[in-house]
Amino acid sequence: MKSLKKKRRIQVVAVAAVALVLSTGLIGYAMRDGINLFRSPTEVMAAPPGPGEVFRIGGLVEIGSLERGVGSEVRFHVTDGGTSVPVSYVGVLPDLFGEDQGMVGLGSYDGATFRATEILAKHDESYMPKEVVEALKEQGVYREPDAQ
């Protein structure tokens, strides 16, 4: 009788272990396209990503680079103080988007221009995305927002 209980317990543990490994594998497979890496303009220019790789780029919108194109196309340069990357975006920009303001864009780099599919702008006068602040600090060009 005891050996039957022992066999059953081993079978339950084995089935649970297989189920755990299988579910972990399925979760990893499902998340492979959902993870978007963040890169600063300097990192993009130093080691250009592959043509179809989707990632996030962040920095400040370069002063004097914002151009409205035909229809809803917008072109501008994003900079971290060291390097700037041209960005092309088709769509409606957030209300708070502007020159010399923090932004994060999601898209891919085609070798010459970052093709954004989504643009995020700062939320208020002092907010800037964490990744952008870190990248600007690394470049030594981060400015603390004015305290009020």
Image: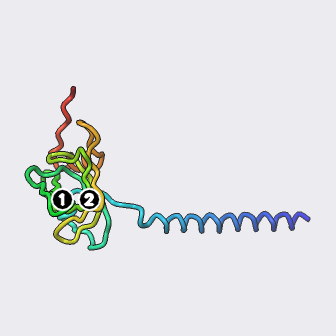
Question: Residue 15: x percent and y percent?
Answer: 70, 67
Q: Mark 1 near mark 2, Cβ–Cβ under 8 Å?
A: yes
Which tag, 1 or 2, sits closer to the chain's start? 1
Q: Is residue 21 above or below residue 124?
A: below
- Asked if residue 42 lies left or right of residue 4, the reply is left
* Quarter of the rendering occupied by the N terminus: bottom right
Q: Dot 2 corresponds to which residue?
A: 91
* Amino acid type shown at disc 2: Gly
Q: Can you tell which mark lies on residue 86?
A: none
Residue 17, by quadrant, is bottom right
> What is the residue that sits farthest to the left in this orientation?
64
Which residue in the protein does label 1 denote? Answer: 74
Give the amino acid at mark 1. Val
**Is residue 137 left or right of 107 when viewed as pictured?**
left
User: Where 139 sits versus 144, above or below?
Assistant: below
Pick the quarter of the image with the C terminus.
top left
